[in-house]
Amino acid sequence: MLRTRVCDVMTTDVVAARPDQSYHQLAESLSSLHISAVPVVDAEGLVVGVVSAADLILKELIDSPQRRFESSKQKLERRKAMGLIAADLMTTPAITTQGGATLAEAAKLMHDRGIKRLPVVDDAGRLVGIVTRGDLLQVFGRSDEEIRREIIDGVVIGDLWMDPAGLVVDVAGGLVKLSGQVDRKSDIGILTGLVRGLDGVVGVSSDLAFDWDDLAQPRTLLRAIR
């Protein structure tokens, strides 16, 4: 079963900034290219930080009165507000991913850290691409028939070596419904889990029945445990 990876959907023509790039140049890049952030790379192409629109907008704080007691976050924001070049403005260390990561892993990282764009780096930390939330949504453009065929050929036959004759697979708008009969109760959890991880699958429901409950403990084993 093949899974789409970050390297399959990322943009390789990446706009990056230098650590000495000015505030004005950074703001102009983000505005003209309609992007929310830009990675900052050193002379060797290593990602050393990210400058986002949120970092640049902190410049508005310069005119606000400084509080007598400020949290560490407020102090950091004030320092960024005074920044003139990327090295002063960027968020570091940069949150990055690698080309071999799954789209689910990249999506979770974006969600957990509240970001819209992820720099993609190689094993040495050099910038090789950018992946956005929009890029991750590409897999949900797969047709229902394409998803259905992968479930039957790739999962049922290819991964689980099961006979598909006893199964009914319906897909509508990326929603998968599984029905029919399987040999073991444990097969239901394994099958639905694999299907849920396929590219383009929005959700999975199951009406599967089973011949043998292999998850139930034999009475003799229960007596031995007691």
Image (cartoon, rainbow, N blue to C red):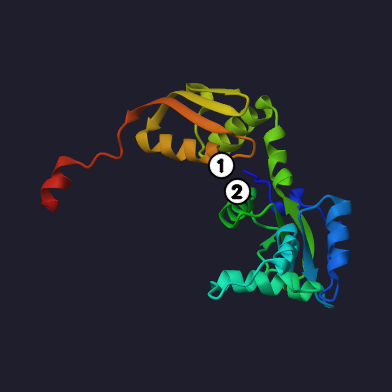
Q: Quadrant of residue 76?
A: bottom right
Of 159 and 104, the residue lying toward us: 104
67 lies above or below 55:
below
Q: Quadrant of residue 51?
A: bottom right
Residue in the image at 58% along x and 30% along y: 152
Name the one closer to the observer, 13 or 156: 13
Res 121 seen here: no
| Residue at numbered disc 2 | 104
Q: Looking at the image, is 4 positioned above or below residue 52?
A: above
Image height of 39 relative to 195, above or below: below
Q: Which residue is mark 1?
A: 197
Q: Residue at x 70, y 65 (%)?
A: 61
Q: Nearer the viewer, mark 2 or mark 1?
A: 2
2 and 1 marks in contact (CB < 8 Å) = yes
Left or right: residue 133 versus residue 194 is right
Q: Quadrant of residue 91?
A: bottom right
Does dot 2 land on a helix, a strand or a loop? helix
Tag 1, which secondary structure? Answer: loop
Query: Marks 2 and 1, how far apart in space?
Result: 9 Å
In the figure, is residue 51 to the left or right of 197? right
Question: Residue at the location (51% across, 37% down)?
Answer: 161
**Screen quadrant of the N terminus:** top right
- Amino acid identity at mark 1: Gly
What percent of the width, then of the height, locates residue 90? 73, 69
The tag earlier along the polypeptide, 2 or 1, is 2
Indicate the position of residue 220 as horizontal and vertical percent values.
Answer: 14, 44
Label annotation for residue 123: none
